[in-house]
Image (cartoon, grey):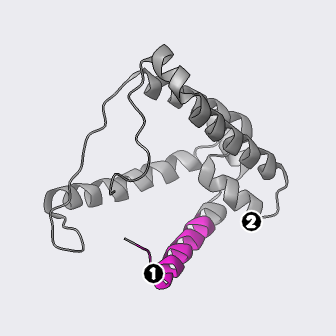
Amino acid sequence: MKTSPLMMLFYLGLGTVFGLVLSRSGAADYNFIQGMFLLEEFQLYGIIGTAVAVTAPGLYFLKRYGKTATGEKLQFERKPGHRGNIYGGFLFGIGWAITGMCPGPILVNIGEGKLYAIAALAGTLVGAGSFGALYPKLQGIFKLPSLQVGTGEG
């Protein structure tokens, strides 16, 4: 299904609002993030906790009563756990701690004019590209599942 220009504008607006919230709350600020990892700043723990507290009931009700735009019941598939989750989470955490950014805040920091965020974006893109190129080799080493390409909708 092709996304209409109106929906693309809507998504752009949501992304902009999300970026503004990240920026104004301090969730994209390097010093706050480093302070969180050093257990010196606790503001981000509150932001993350609030996000979980707000999102969890919504997901519960979506899962229980939710329907798609066409009226079909929403289907939530559980992803199987494997070693790659542990290694990937470890690498993600290291990158987050070193750069002070995960993917969303990288774009927020670039938007705020912080040039060091361009290096983080480059590292993210190189890492994702390398992972995709090396996946067949990594699959055997780490016993990873086969890679699904696309959304699965044809």
Which range is magenta? 2-21
19 sits to left or right of 11: right
For the C terminus, the quadrant is: bottom left
104 sits to left or right of 98: left
The residue under label 1 is 4
> Callout 1: 10 Å neighbours few (<14), some, many (20+)?
few
**Amino acid at pointer 1:** Ser
Work out whether residue 13 can be spotted.
yes
**Amino acid at pointer 2:** Gly
Residue 20 found in image quarter: bottom right
Q: Which mark is residue 111?
A: 2
> Up-down: is 101 above or below 92?
below
Residue 145 found in image quarter: top left
Residue lying furthest top in this view?
A: 141
> Callout 2: 10 Å neighbours few (<14), some, many (20+)?
some
Residue at disc 1, secondary structure: loop
Q: Position of residue 10 (x, y in %)?
A: 49, 79
